[in-house]
């Protein structure tokens, strides 16, 4: 196994051109330029990540009955908007609107709900009111998602990197990480082609709850929390409840065998107020025991104490001709807490 090497992040800035890292291609499934409205009875509520799901039965009990499968955003995003599991009661007669399925299936990506009392629920971070005017009741405030909730009192802002940090949606480098292009080696290209030929690899299904690489989880559009536990620091990523343990004791040796799992082994040190983290983590496609890649990261609090910045460099000579740089930031939101990701969730149905 290669030993961890110190690598100055800033020295790699000139190596890569940056691009936006997309979350997932739900737009390939739902038509974001389309629009559909359905009225019916809420017959099932599944409050879970990465997307909540409802069933709405149209023309229930008649020969024209249709059961619509409704999908919407992550629970953490909706909770930040003030939308909870209790917002949409089971058995309620509702009107819904959203993006239709591209193949014409009875599926909708949900943007709006109109409840029986004419309260409108905004379910999308890009949506405004649809059926009600400014005097009408509405649930769903998107301001926190877009950085509109800021602690104005500097003395109440974080004084270190420790705490809960939120993604700011549609903000470059926060909603989606900025990262350099992958300059794959011939070995990597051959391995990827073999995986595709075998029907393996590729991006997981959007509802898949299997663990992801801890490094990849950092780029997903979800909150993180950094906690100081003394000899270790935990980086808690909301996505799939991923917990990275960073060993801070310089006298503690790297294990002779690093587990072949999605977490790897991390150790850290302070460079002033910046946390530097080095990680050995398993990746597939190795030869002759070369089964691991290295990452080198920094976590730094901004001068205004309102933003956490992260730089990440992947070093993997077997798979990449040059190191790959990624950058991401999160923002402090007053009162924010880290909730469980809860990929199985709760189900209520008639």
Image: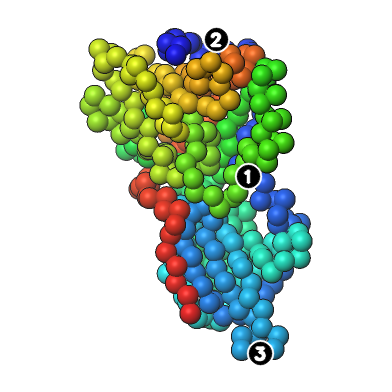
For residue 242, above or below residue 43:
above
Badge 1: how crowded within 10 Å, few (<14), some, or many (20+)?
few
Q: Are marks 2 and 3 in contact (CB under 8 Å)?
A: no
Badge 2: how crowded within 10 Å, few (<14), some, or many (20+)?
few
Earlier in the chain: of badge 3 and badge 1, it is: 1
Q: Locate residue 291, reporting x and y percent.
A: 50, 21
Q: Nearer the viewer, mark 3 or mark 1?
A: 3
Task: Name the disc covering residue 24, or none.
Answer: 1
Which residue position holds label 3? 62
**Residue 154 is drawn in which quadrant?**
top left
Which residue position holds label 2? 11
Q: Locate residue 97, reporting x and y percent.
A: 66, 68
Task: Name the disc covering residue 320, or none.
Answer: none
Badge 3: how crowded within 10 Å, few (<14), some, or many (20+)?
few
Q: Are marks 2 and 1 in contact (CB under 8 Å)?
A: no
For residue 204, above or below residue 118:
above
Q: How is the image coloured?
A: rainbow
Q: Give the distance between the C-alpha atoms of the residues marked 3 and 1, in whole angstroms.
A: 37 Å
Q: Nearer the viewer, mark 2 or mark 1?
A: 1
As helix, strand or loop, the secondary structure at mark 1 comes to loop
Assign the N terminus to one quadrant of the image. Answer: top left
Q: Locate residue 317, reporting x and y percent.
A: 58, 13
**Residue 111 is drawn in which quadrant?**
bottom right
As helix, strand or loop, the secondary structure at mark 3 comes to loop
**Residue 107 is drawn in which quadrant?**
bottom right
């Amino acid at each position: 196994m290669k030993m961890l090497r110190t690598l100055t992040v800033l020295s790699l800035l000139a190596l890569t051109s940056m691009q936006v890292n997309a979350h997932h291609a739900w737009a390939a499934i739902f038509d974001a330029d389309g629009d559909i409205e359905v009225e019916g009875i809420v017959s099932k509520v599944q409050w879970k990540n990465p997307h909540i799901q409802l069933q709405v039965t149209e023309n229930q009990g008649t020969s024209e009955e249709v059961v619509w499968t409704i999908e919407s955003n992550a629970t953490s995003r909706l909770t930040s908007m003030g939308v909870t599991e209790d917002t949409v009661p089971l058995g309620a007669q509702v009107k819904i609107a959203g993006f239709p399925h591209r193949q014409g299936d009875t599926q909708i990506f949900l943007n709006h709900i109109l409840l029986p009392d004419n309260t409108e629920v905004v379910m999308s971070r890009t949506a405004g009111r649809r059926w009600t005017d400014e005097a009408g009741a509405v649930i769903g405030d998107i301001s926190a998602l877009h950085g509109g909730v800021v602690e104005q009192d500097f003395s109440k802002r974080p004084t270190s990197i420790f705490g809960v940090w939120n993604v700011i949606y549609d903000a470059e480098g926060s909603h989606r990480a900025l990262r350099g292009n992958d300059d794959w080696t011939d070995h990597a290209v051959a391995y990827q082609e073999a995986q595709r030929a075998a029907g393996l690899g590729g991006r997981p299904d959007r509802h898949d709850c299997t663990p992801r690489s801890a490094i990849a989880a950092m780029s997903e559009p979800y909150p993180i929390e950094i906690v100081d536990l003394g000899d270790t620091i935990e980086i808690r990523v909301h996505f799939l409840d991923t917990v990275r343990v960073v060993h801070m004791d310089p006298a503690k040796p790297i294990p002779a065998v690093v587990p072949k799992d999605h977490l790897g082994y991390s150790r850290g040190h302070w460079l002033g107020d910046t946390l530097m983290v080095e990680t050995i983590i398993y990746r597939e496609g190795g030869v002759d025991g070369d089964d691991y890649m290295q990452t080198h990261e920094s976590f730094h609090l901004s001068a205004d104490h309102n933003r956490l910045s992260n730089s990440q460099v992947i070093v993997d000579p077997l798979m990449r001709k040059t190191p790959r740089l990624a950058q991401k930031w999160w923002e402090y939101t007053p009162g924010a807490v880290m909730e469980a990701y809860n990929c199985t969730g709760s189900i209520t149905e008639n």
